[in-house]
């Protein structure tokens, strides 16, 4: 929990330029998302049967909602006919959820950081594809679009009363401030290392919890007795 809080604080400082890493200076560039990329929709004209025996893979809504980086180990299956014109996802694509019951949860973003084939996007999200990686690199995007600063901008464009939605047009009109590619790489490296440390601690915690469970099983049943 402490590492997660530390990461959030680092993201807030590093992704907004409030804290600059050693060796970097100069102004950041202000850009509109529609100037550096385009949007596309998810799967269309699909029914329940199409998801029972799939010949292709698709990124689920929960995969986008739950992860800043797409987990390719939890993809769903979908049937795609040769005659269909569906947009395949690509490395570096950024996905946004379009609807939620609260404005705080709408527009959650996730980035595809793996090369994939014959893979599509669910119909409850839309994709955003950078024109190139000269403006934003994908690993930096995976943190940028989950950062508090960008999330606050997303709240402002969420529309609705009982359910909140965003549109491709509104997202493409959003503006972000970005550093040079070199600074993006360095910031991303710092945050990736924090993520690795969090994962190590999660594994240690899981091992300790399993050990406790085993001890409870033998101690509370008398299978193992403690010497006085």
Image (cartoon, grey):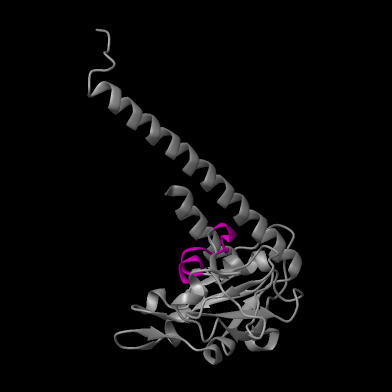
Residue at 66% over, 86% down: 83
Q: Position of residue 79 (x, y in %)?
A: 57, 74
Residue at 54% over, 59% down: 10
Q: Left or right? Give the position of 196 relative to 212.
A: right
Foreground: 192 or 162? 162
Residue 223 visible to an observer of this rendering: yes
Q: Left or right? Give the position of 136 relative to 40.
A: right
- Whether the magenta-drawn stretch holds residue 187 is answered as no
Residue numbers of the magenta segment:
60-73
Quadrant of the rendered structure where residue 206 is? top left
Q: Position of residue 47 (x, y in %)?
A: 46, 81
- Whether the magenta-drawn stretch holds residue 70 is answered as yes
Q: Is 134 placed above or below 185 here?
A: below
Residue 15 visible to an observer of this rendering: no
Residue at 29% over, 22% down: 218
Q: Left or right? Give the position of 144 relative to 213.
A: right
Foreground: 29 or 157? 157
Q: Residue furthest top?
A: 228
Foreground: 2 or 146? 146
């Amino acid at each position: 929990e402490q590492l997660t809080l530390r990461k959030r604080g680092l993201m807030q400082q590093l992704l907004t330029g409030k804290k600059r890493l050693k060796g970097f200076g100069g102004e950041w560039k202000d850009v509109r998302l529609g100037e550096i990329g385009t949007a596309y929709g998810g799967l269309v004209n699909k029914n329940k049967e199409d998801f029972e025996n799939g010949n292709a893979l698709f990124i689920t809504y929960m995969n986008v909602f739950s992860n800043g980086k797409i987990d390719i180990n939890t993809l769903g299956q979908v049937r795609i006919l040769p005659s269909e014109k569906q947009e395949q996802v690509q490395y570096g694509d950024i996905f946004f959820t379009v609807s939620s019951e609260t404005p705080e949860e709408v527009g959650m973003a996730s980035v595809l950081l793996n090369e994939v084939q014959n893979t599509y996007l669910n119909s409850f999200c839309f994709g955003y594809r950078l024109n190139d990686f000269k403006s934003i690199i994908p690993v930096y995007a995976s943190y940028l679009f989950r950062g508090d600063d960008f999330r606050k901008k997303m709240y402002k464009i969420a529309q609705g009363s009982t359910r909140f939605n965003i549109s491709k047009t509104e997202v493409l009109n959003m503006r972000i401030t970005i550093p040079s590619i070199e600074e993006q790489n360095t910031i991303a490296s710092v945050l990736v290392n924090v993520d690795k440390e969090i994962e190590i601690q999660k594994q240690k915690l899981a091992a300790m919890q399993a050990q406790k469970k085993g001890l409870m099983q033998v101690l509370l049943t008398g299978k193992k007795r403690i010497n006085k």
